[in-house]
Image (spheres, helix red, strand yellow):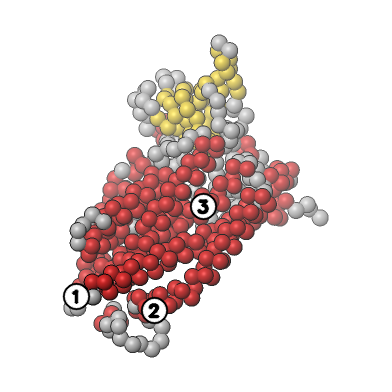
């Protein structure tokens, strides 16, 4: 907390989180890493998808339907992870009034919503052949649907006010309130009986998945995560530049 | 107190209050949040006959057989949670994953004779993913029979599958 008393514009030695609150520093840093993030994202996704769809074994009881996992699981993790990022931005925006935090939240929102929608759609496509139903109102499925609506609500609130600052504030509060949905999603399969199976990966047990399926899944996850980061960074860069252009125009 | 510090405490305080409220709400509605009831729950706390309930559990090994009424086969099987078993009757197409030893959810109602008539059956698959060869090797080694429940822990697969020297 003592660090916050230093104005963000002050020159500082050593690593400090405030360096990234400076749009100029962020833009320079982003332009350096962007090509690498995109390249490695595409590389990992291609390897993971080809490996998962053509070379990994079919499941003993689910057969080839199990391959939906290579899309569904990364989307599910990123949907929650993205929302966690959104909530962190909201925290920075509400308490420290970071100028970048609001723009970052605005960038994450639509991408996160699409990812959550993909998670729900692929899950539904997987559920029909395996469970025998497209959708049930069990705790896991419902809490992820709530997450989707939280993303949509966040996008809507951002643009619901004439005063953009008010919109940022309202959306940040919603993002923070909604963060409680994340533990509910995570533990829903342990707390209540659900149709959705409990998670395959845990800290205490060996993963209940053969390595021949886990490696392509890890590649897919890393690839999609890099893609998510790249999309947010590109969006954020555009938003910063747009804001600078508007600022210049208004000052002339 | 600086304004930033004050805002931090306000946000933290609000978050803690909100977390408490959500915990209380969830624990109060816990009974309604379960998607299905286990056979022992249903027998110990019977609901009014004829109300639609979702019954979940494992299909008991060797309990599945078919009876024929007017050319339509009715699947009859027992569902258990290890403590109690309930007989389920279902006319219709069972999901692909349905088998003895599989967890299933039957949607229907319990009648006077404690027989559960389902109008829908869903198959629940467990969190284990393994190739066919591993499953076959595990069954050949005699360490696991899918009829009697989920496979053993993944970290035991390797030494179970390896032939004994």
In the picture of the structure, the residue carrying the numbered disc 1 is B3
**Label 1: which secondary element:** helix
Q: CA distance from mark 2 to mark 1?
A: 26 Å
Check disc 3 and report the residue beneath it: A73
Closer to us: B55 or A120: A120
Residue B17: horizontal and vertical position, in percent? 24, 59
Q: CA distance from mark 3 to mark 1?
A: 42 Å
Query: Which one is closest to the eye, mark 2 or mark 1?
Result: 2
Coordinates of residue A24 in the picture (x, y in percent): 37, 78
Same chain for mark 3 and mark 1? The answer is no
x, y percent for residue A34: 49, 70
Disc 3 + disc 1, Cβ < 8 Å: no
Label 1 marks a residue whose chain is B
Left or right, A52 with respect to B121, comes to right
Image quadrant of residue B114? top left
Give the number of the disc on residue A25. 2
Q: Residue at x 58, y 12 (%)?
A: B71
- Mark 2 or mark 3: name the one nearer the start of the chain: 2
Check the residue under mark 2 and report the chain it is in.
A
């Amino acid at each position: 907390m003592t660090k916050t008393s230093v104005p963000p514009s002050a020159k500082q030695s050593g690593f400090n989180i405030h360096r990234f609150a400076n749009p100029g520093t962020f833009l320079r840093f982003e332009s350096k890493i962007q090509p690498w993030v995109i390249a490695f994202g595409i590389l990992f996704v291609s390897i993971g998808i080809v490996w998962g769809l053509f070379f990994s074994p079919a499941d003993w009881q689910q057969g080839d339907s199990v391959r939906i996992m290579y899309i569904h699981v990364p989307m599910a993790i990123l949907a929650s992870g993205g929302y966690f990022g959104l909530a962190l931005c909201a925290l920075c925006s509400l308490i420290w009034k970071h100028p970048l935090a609001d723009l970052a939240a605005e960038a994450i929102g639509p991408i996160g919503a699409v990812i959550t929608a993909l998670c729900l759609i692929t899950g539904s496509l997987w559920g029909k052949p395996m469970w025998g139903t497209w959708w049930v109102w069990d705790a896991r499925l419902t809490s992820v649907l709530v997450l989707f609506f939280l993303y949509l609500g966040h996008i809507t609130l951002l643009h619901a006010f004439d005063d953009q600052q008010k919109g940022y504030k309202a959306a940040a509060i919603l993002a923070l309130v909604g963060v409680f949905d994340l533990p509910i999603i995570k533990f829903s399969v342990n707390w209540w009986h659900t149709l959705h199976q409990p998670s395959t990966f845990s800290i205490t047990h060996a993963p209940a998945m053969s390595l021949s399926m886990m490696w392509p899944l890890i590649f897919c996850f890393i690839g999609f995560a890099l893609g998510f980061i790249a999309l947010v960074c590109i969006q954020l860069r555009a938003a910063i530049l747009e804001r600078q252009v508007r600022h210049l125009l208004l000052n002339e | 107190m600086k304004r930033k510090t004050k805002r931090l405490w306000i946000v933290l305080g609000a978050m803690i209050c909100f977390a408490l409220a959500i915990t209380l709400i969830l624990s109060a509605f816990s009974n309604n949040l379960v998607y299905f009831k286990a056979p022992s729950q249903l027998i110990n706390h019977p609901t009014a006959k004829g109300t639609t309930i979702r019954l979940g559990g494992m299909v008991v090994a060797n309990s599945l057989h078919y009876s024929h009424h007017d050319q339509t086969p009715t699947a009859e099987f027992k569902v258990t949670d290890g403590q109690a078993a309930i007989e389920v009757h279902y006319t219709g197409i069972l999901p692909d994953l349905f088998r003895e030893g599989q967890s299933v959810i039957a949607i229907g109602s319990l009648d006077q004779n404690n027989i559960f008539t389902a109008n829908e059956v869903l198959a629940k698959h467990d969190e284990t993913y393994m190739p066919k060869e591993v499953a076959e090797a595990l069954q050949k080694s005699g360490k696991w029979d899918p009829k009697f429940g989920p496979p053993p822990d993944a970290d035991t697969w390797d030494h179970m599958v390896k032939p004994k020297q």
